[in-house]
Image (cartoon, rainbow, N blue to C red):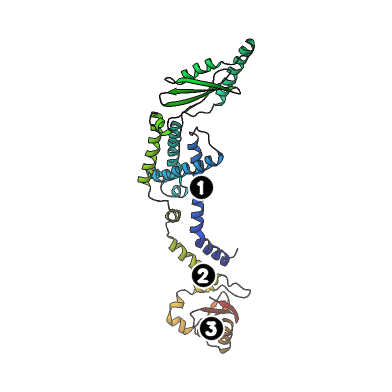
Amino acid sequence: MDIGTLAATLSDLVSILPVMLYAMQWTFYIFLVWFLGSVSMKGYRKQKSFAAGVVATLLVGTICLIGGIAFSGFVPFLNGGIFSIMQLGVIIAGLPVSIALAVSLRLMTHRDRDLKPGEIIDSLKRKVTVLETQLDKKARPMTVAEARRKAEEALPGYESRKGRRVGSEWEIELKKGEHSARVIMDAWDGEIKKVEKDESELAGFFRDPLMIAGLAVIVAVIIGSAVFFEGFPDPVQDFTSVLGISMEELANLSAKVEGSAGIIDNTEPGCVKLESVMIAYQSELQDINFLRSHIYTDDATSRLVESSSNDVVMGMFMVAHEGHEVVLAFTQSQRVCYLTDGKFCGCT
């Protein structure tokens, strides 16, 4: 890759750098939302559909992300330099928020439980034992009276009203004053599978200290996040702070490199590099006496420059460089054209 191409590439990169940085940040945030949300949802024990699970994970993950950004200020050693670009402070602060929400969701849904693998094995062993016992008794399931008695033991204070057999399960209806309830249990071993009460979810919620504690954790996380949240980090600012240069200065530097590429790229066969000439005579070209002593006048050369550059020549100077005669022509549009041994080599 030549210098001109490199300079053009650098200019393009500088122009799209902010877009790239923002795209990378939000791609990372989407991943972090899903990751932190999945960690939090490990504490949710209620049954849910796939779609509801995805929505809940994204919602909880967004709360975790905002909390992570809000509380990242409390991890000062990760808020500067390369760590700010990598968003390590957000990750480190977001994990405790995610775990706190997982605990709160577990507390709020502790009544709904799924059997763990070990509990499933224990349940199967118990059912096999019951089956063997019942086979010895000619496989007799629980009677309705036995089922009603077990349901009353599961809900102290409730009185069973009636029961009905549905497949391998007993459904027992109970009453307690104006409140009713339903208990579903295994017809063979009496394992309680589900308890339903007609009291409102809200009423039951505020009588359960674990649910209240879970809600308190969520409220505390949301309030804390709202108080300390100061907006999403600016990836461009973080990037330029690491470089020690602003985007404006970076753009100006890129423009200078791209502008100088035209000097460097004039390397046609038979031509010296104009850059090397300008460097070699840097001080002399600012000396009026030197310029006067090296004025070059030749109509043929002037016409050649004007026809090749479509510009008007204002003055020409001849210098010797690397064994070649180099003519520098300054044009009306403030360009510098040059010839090497009478060959037109270009303008910049």
Q: Nearer the viewer, residue 267 or 202?
A: 202
The label nearer to you, 2 versus 3, is 3
Q: Real-space Cα distance between discs 2 and 1?
A: 42 Å
Secondary structure of the residue carrying tag 3 is: loop
The 10 Å Cα crowd at callout 3, few under 14, some 14 to 19, many 20 or more, is: some
Q: Closer to the N terminus: mark 2 or mark 1?
A: 1
Residue at figure coordinates x 50%, y 66% from the top left: 257
Place residue 344 in its image quadrant: bottom right
Residue at numbered disc 3: 311
Q: Closer to the N terminus: mark 3 or mark 1?
A: 1
Secondary structure of the residue carrying tag 2 is: helix
Measured from the top left, where is residue 15 in percent x and y?
50, 63
Measured from the top left, where is residue 78 in percent x and y?
42, 45
Contact between marks 3 and 1 (CB within 8 A): the answer is no
Residue type beneath disc 1: Ile
Q: Nearer the viewer, residue 220 or 155?
A: 155
The 10 Å Cα crowd at callout 2, few under 14, some 14 to 19, many 20 or more, is: some
Residue 260, numbered circle:
2
Asked whether the viewer can see residue 341, the reply is no
Residue type beneath disc 3: Asp
Residue 27, relative to residue 267: is it above or below?
above
